[in-house]
Image (cartoon, coloured by chain):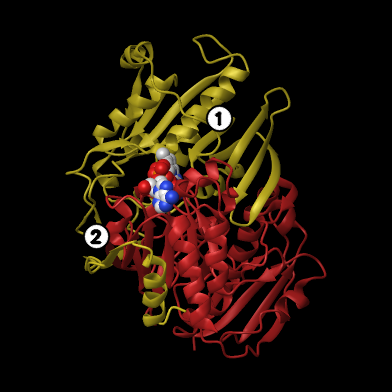
Chain colours: A yellow, B red
Amino acid sequence: MKIAVCVKQVPDSWAEKKMVNGTLDRENVDAVLNDLDEYAVEEALRIAEEHGGNDEGGPNTVTVISMGPERATEAVRKALSMGANDAILVTDSKLAGADALTTSAVLAGVISKENFDLVLCGTESTDARMSVVPAMLAERLSSAQLTFASSVTVDPASGKVTISRVTEAGVDEMYANFPCVISVVEKINEPRYPSFKGIMAAKKKSIDVRDLAAVGVSVTSAWSLVADSAPRPPRAAGIKVTDDGSGGEKLASYLAEKKLI
Amino acid sequence: MSNVFILADFLDGKPTKTNAELATAGARIGSVTAVVLAPVGKGEAQASSLATGPISQILIVESDYFSQNGVAAVADALAQLVTTKSPAALLVASHAFGKEVAARVAVRTDSGIITDAVDVSSDLTATQLVFGGSTTVHSKVSHGTPIITVRPNSINAELTPATPVVEKIELALDENSKKATITSSKPPVQGDRPQLTEANIVVSGGRGTNGDFSPVEAFADSMGAAVGASRAATDAGWYPHTHQVGQTGKSVSPQLYVACGISGAIQHRAGMQTSKTIVVINKDPEAPLFEIADFGVIGDLFAVLPKATEGVKAHKS
Ligand SMILES: Cc1cc2nc3c(=O)[nH]c(=O)nc-3n(C[C@H](O)[C@H](O)[C@H](O)COP(=O)(O)OP(=O)(O)OC[C@H]3O[C@@H](n4cnc5c(N)ncnc54)[C@H](O)[C@@H]3O)c2cc1C
């Protein structure tokens, strides 16, 4: 099987984020591999390992695909050190501030040239939190959409993929045939830590860095524009009481006073 | 006058409160058409269940592919309607399904998309709260049909009775929208409590409950609240995953959020930080969630909650 995993480099979840010129200021924060994408990398590796592995010359390959600034190679390297085989990074100054429609167009541009059987993604990036790229990819690639998977079973011989989809609407059992776009929820597995061997091996793995022209996708003007953004006033300091036996009553009185009951 | 589409929102066959909220936002821009995508034979019944909100027209498309093929089939029908009817905007409920449908329609119609809006103005400016609610962003779609997903429980719905004109439309769905097949669907276990994302009040329990949610549930019931949980509680199997609040659970923004025995990890905050009033009960005075609490009680939830429940009941009687 040819398996792709789409990953994104994001500001560390703990870093303070702010807006500059209508987009997230990514320059001045620590950047990491989007933690929800780690589950997708892990699942891709598990699928490969369950069906003959992804060693050189083996039946499967796991390719990491990313779009981002040049420094996104760090996040890509992390996925490689977990055990992916190789990587493609699309980087281009025209992509600064790209939205989900552009991102999905670029990723689809790369994927459509490679004949992947499976494309795995996390359910969302921790910075933009839109949760739309996997569905956009499926639409653009005319592939089956199997998203929000809490379990994935693959039969490489027949090309059939079965998942459980878990959302607020409940649990759906679904299946489709290759090629599929799959997004995985964080309950699906426990991502491995890169081993020392994995980290060393990743240094030698190739990252194919391409610009937009090489992908063959042109970026038109933005689909949406930010008019303004402003930090919200911090929440006014609240009331804090220590329970001395009357904390519960005080809470009830507070709620009554605020007309919340 | 311009016309705005809303995708009628159903959970387990029943209309959600979000429909009236979407219609209220839509009516600021133009007349509102609700699109009902229903199983064969169910369209009229589902349309007539949309009883509240300023809805002036309902378009029904019936197809069993909607439940068999899910997101792709619904998006296909909706994209076809958007293309042929050219509405001024499309508003969709901002949950996993709604956002995915909106995403595919955006690609198909070459339109801009804004997700998780908490408000939409008459000139189609969407308001979003980003970075865990710390920043307000106003933005506008600048290409194609503006597609905006709106967070449930963010807009004060006009609860006027709907008096729509109903029209049924026949559509043929594209083969591409039938590539994934749903073999079974289990709706979430609902119980008697309100739906988490729609509730005005949410009471959540975390690791501090040590597996015993009874004081959390009793307090929730005294206030007619929904019950939520932190990931520590859902992972331990103490409460169903469908009740998880946070980055990888549900995003809620109720009038009141009460967190009991929850420390306040960034992933939990991501799902509740935009709540209007936040109450925290935690025995650790240093618990980070106190930083965003309007009212905090430092104490044992097993002592505080029963007294608070009594207090609420006394106030109500
Ligand atoms: C990729 C990823 C996604 C995640 N997504 C989510 C998510 O969607 N939602 C989520 O909630 N978490 C999520 N998490 C987990 C998150 O990081 C925290 O681990 C989790 O929220 C902790 O839950 P907790 O606050 O209940 O437990 P803890 O952090 O263990 O806190 C328990 C609190 O209870 C207090 N306590 C103990 N006993 C009592 C008592 N008797 N009375 C009062 N207080 C008491 C303690 O002082 C403590 O503050 C995610 C993590 C990752 C890595």
Q: Is residue B264 left or right of residue A183?
A: left
Q: Residue placed at 36% from the left, 75% from the top? A: A254
Given residues B239 and A155, the one toward you in this image is: B239
Kindly indicate whether the residue at mark 2 contacts the one at mark 1 (C-beta within 8 angstroms).
no
Q: Is residue B31 visible?
A: yes
- Tag 2 subunit: A
In the rendered structure, which amino acid carries the disc numbered 2?
Gly
**Relative depth, front residue between B291 and B212:** B212
Please tell me which residue lies in front, A255 or B64.
Answer: A255
The residue under the point 41% across, 72% down is A249
Counting from the top left corner in percent of width and height, residue B202 is at 49, 65
**Ligand 1 lies under 8 Å from the Cβ of mark 2:** no
The amino acid at mark 1 is Asn
Q: Residue furthest left?
A: A28
The CB of the residue at mark 1 lies under 8 Å from ligand 1? no
User: Which residue is located at x 24 percent, y 45 percent?
Assistant: A15
* Left or right relative to A58: residue A252: left
Q: Quadrant of residue B62?
A: bottom right
Q: Which mark is residue A115?
A: 1
Residue B152 seen anywhere in this rendered image of the structure: no
- Tag 1, which secondary structure? loop
Protein chain holding label 1: A
The number of discs equals 2
The answer to which of marks 1 and 2 sits earlier in the sequence is: 2
Task: Say which of marks 1 and 2 sits in front.
Answer: 2
Q: Would you name the residue on which mark 2 appears?
A: A22
**Element carrying mark 2:** loop
Q: Position of residue B131 (x, y in %)?
A: 31, 56
